[in-house]
Image (cartoon, helix red, strand yellow):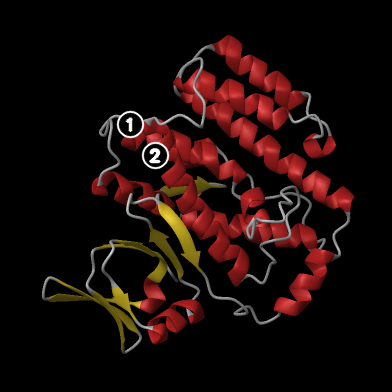
Amino acid sequence: MTWRNVMIKDGEYLRLKLDNLEVEKGGKKFSIPLTDIATITLEGDMMTLTTKLLAKFAQHNIAVIVCDNKYHPCGIFLGFGQYHRTAKRNLEQIAWDEGKKSAVWTEIVRQKIQNQIAVLEARDLEQERIQKIQTLCDAMTLGDKTNREGHAAKLYFNTLYGLGFTREESRFENFAMDYGYTIIRAYMARLVTSLGLIPTLGVFHRNEFNSFNLVDDLMEPFRPLMDWYIGEEILPKYKDYLSWEARCMLIDFLNQPYVHQGKKTTVDLLMLDYVNSFIKIMNKKASHLTEITLGGLRGV
């Protein structure tokens, strides 16, 4: 079972050694079994690795996240064709009709908005504004054709971070969210591709320039969970600069404990269960997605 989310900063050489990742840095060597690794995040301008190692990453379904010189994730390397029935799953995904897509998207948006409400309630913020968001959620139509999600998001962020706040501002909160969301997106992309789904074929997102439309659909309910985690673990400790320690903590979100149906799991395993529930709906073996709740992350 893969469980490690590895972060490498300024590693000099990355090699394959007996089915292990060997990292050489400052004259020292560190070894990690490939079978333990789910994601690797690479930071630094001077790093050498081989195509043989990249091929092994792909074969082990390890997502490699590359950061730019500002330490922001800017690229993802993923394997493809590792699922044993990829063509069959692709045909099943293509065969979905618009009605099913609309129903699934409605459920995704509803989960996301309910989690946004839970974040605001956990922060004990203004009840009147929380009720307005709940009213928007209750009024949502099939496929969210009236864009209740967008209206709810504006109210949510203005309640969480103050009136006038926008996601386009150069603020520390936005830096943390951008980094955190990219980590969720990368891991979701790993799951989608490793389970034989077509990442470009979304149920709502249909941007012709986006290689991860389905990924962007499925990650939505997890965004508010990251918002809460940032509020608990990042904002109280770090103010202006997303330090190495802060970035490591954001990556560690995937390893956070989560209580699902009375059983203890972790966020990364929950995401796997969530994607599998999507596949079950696609195959008519289930009618609902796995429920994602802030309460599960908080253990309540």
Q: Amino acid at mark 1?
A: Leu
In the rendered view, tell whether residue 205 sits above or below residue 227.
Answer: below
How far apart are labels 1 and 2 at the CA level?
Answer: 9 Å
Q: Amino acid at mark 2?
A: Ala
Give the residue number, with chain letter if any, for mark 2: 176
Q: Position of residue 46 (x, y in %)?
A: 26, 68
Q: Position of residue 165 (x, y in %)?
A: 49, 22
Between residue 225 and residue 215, name the one nearer to us. Answer: 215
Residue furthest left as drawn:
27
Q: What residue is shown at x 52% (from left), y 70% (from top)?
A: 78
Find numbered disc 1 in the image and state the secondary structure of the residue it sits on. loop
Residue 87 as seen in the image, left or right of residue 161: right
In the rendered view, tell whether residue 154 sits above or below residue 241.
Answer: above
Do the residues under discs 1 and 2 have CB atoms within 8 angstroms? yes
Find numbered disc 2 in the image and state the secondary structure of the residue it sits on. helix
Q: Nearer the viewer, mark 1 or mark 2?
A: 2
Give the residue number, with chain letter if any, for mark 1: 235
Q: Position of residue 172 (x, y in %)?
A: 36, 32
> Are there few (<14), some (14-19), or many (20+) residues within 10 Å of tag 2?
many
Residue 132 as seen in the image, left or right of residue 57: right
Q: What residue is shown at x 62% (from left), y 31% (from top)?
A: 114
Query: Is residue 271 something one can see in this rendering?
Result: yes
Residue furthest bottom as drawn:
18
